[in-house]
Image (cartoon, rainbow, N blue to C red):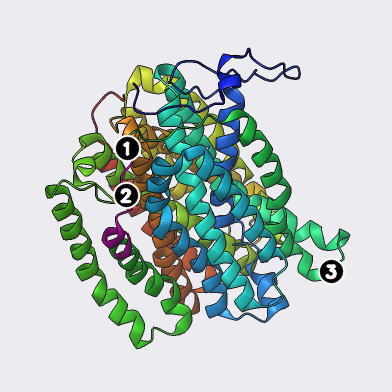
Amino acid sequence: MSESSVHTSPRAASGPARATPAGQEPVRHHDHPTPVLGTLGLFTVLLGAALPLIDFFIVNVALPTIDRDLDAGPAMLELVVAGYGLAYAVLLVLGGRLGDMVGRRRLFLIGMAAFGITSLACGLAPDAWTLVGARVAQGAAAALMLPQVLATIQAATRGPRRARAMSLYGATAGLSMVAGQILGGVLVAAAPMASVFGESAGWRSVFLVNVPVVVVGLILAARAVPETRSDRPAPVDVPGTLLLALSLITLLAPLTEGRAAGWPLWTWLSLALFPFSAYAFYRVERRADRLGRVPLVPPSLLRLDSLRRGLALVVPFSIGFGGFMFVIAVALQQGLRLGPAAAGLSLAPMALAFFGASLAGPRLVRRYGTRVVTAGGLIQAVGVVGLALTAHCAWQGLGIWGLLPGVAIAGLGQGLQLPVLFRIVLSDVPPEKAGVGGGVMTTTQQAALALGVATLGTLFLALVPALGMRDALVVTLLAQLAAVALTVGLSLRLPRTVG
């Protein structure tokens, strides 16, 4: 018996493939226990992966209009961003565990439906506090949905198909983070012209656009995504879940809210509590492992060399990526006075270059191994330096065309790194722990993205009054360059081949 199983009705198990419209792959029901993720199923789960990442970044260009319409203020705007990110990061590993237990397809459907409902609540929010509450709920829904994507790919693909699926997942993740701001800018600019909501339609549309996408996703998932689960599901690790939540909250909440709130006493107390809560989480998980229980994050999983080394690179990469996306949105709109559409579209070359590099990644990895990651980091560094020089020398009148070379080169380098890192992290994770492995990786990525917004974003905004927007951006880009350099250095310690 395989570690994962596909569940179909008796009639479906014995019947032939159903006819499908031209151009679509037929959904076949298999008598054998190995689940098969077809092309349509892969598209569907990748759609589910794109939605949470798009929504993490889509609000960046909508924050000024939210502020004007709801009279939110800086601290409340930080909560609109941080509430989603915190709920998302805190619950991702738990979402992976629940998928292993009750079925990944089932939880994917539940999470996607909840994501659509909470997106509707965000889009119809009458005031700032309602929007914050809906964003927290939206983050929790995303945490149920996203871990099932990687777990399903791990459990329902093999060999070259898995390598291709992981490459497409990495391409989807990176493209979604850039596309979020592009789509947000276009919607904020265009929606008020054709809506009963008037000026508020711009920011409301960045949430409401999810609803029809979710409806389509639910129909496709019910038809094309196979059910998989662990044959030996473990119960929920309540102490581990609570301590992981405490650790992430005590680190991310003060860093994301501190600047806007004026660094009150609670932020410093929270940061002081973080190392103790993190150490308590480690001790509880190690003790549970020794007693033969199944902890939320099994230490045996972290002993996998590929997972440990891959995560070590995901952290600085994501810190730099998350910080850059936040800072560039503020700099283009408030510094260069670009409209939301122009600010979003200025990142289109980055998205295209990232996607192209991601698609070429599997072929390059077969030939050059993990040195593709090193090369990608060096290329990204060239792009970041180019952006810093462009901002310093040609700030006045800088627009989409002036930014194009730097963002395109940076996107090319990022596209050569992220999909390969995802493959490395999960290459040795056994199928029965696919949900946990996917949850650990996405939690690390999400926490690092939020940490990047908090640290590089705080640095940038703190420098603006003294240095001005241009020089603050240049200094922040140089700080991001340090994260890129760390990624390049760590990449030299990766094994040459990828499983």
* SS at badge 3: helix
> Which residue is at the far front?
10
Disc number at residue 433? 1
Q: Which mark is residue 235?
A: 2
Q: Are marks 2 and 3 in contact (CB under 8 Å)?
A: no
Q: Could you tell me how far apart the alpha carbons at marks 3 and 1 are, in whole angstroms?
A: 48 Å
Tell me the residue at 18%/63% (across/down). 279
Quarter occupied by the C terminus: top left
Neighbour tally class for label 1: few under 14, some 14-19, many 20 plus, Cα within 10 Å: many
Q: Is residue 30 left or right of residue 231?
A: right
Q: Is residue 350 visible?
A: no
The numbered mark, 1 or 2, whose residue comes first in the sequence reads 2
Question: Is 233 one of the magenta-colored residues?
Answer: yes
Identify which residue, 178 or 235, lies in the foreground: 235
Residue 273 location in percent, x, y?
25, 75
Q: Which residues are magenta?
A: 232-242
Residue at 42% across / 24% down in the picture? 163
Q: Nearer the viewer, residue 413 or 387?
A: 413
Q: Which residue is mark 3?
A: 198
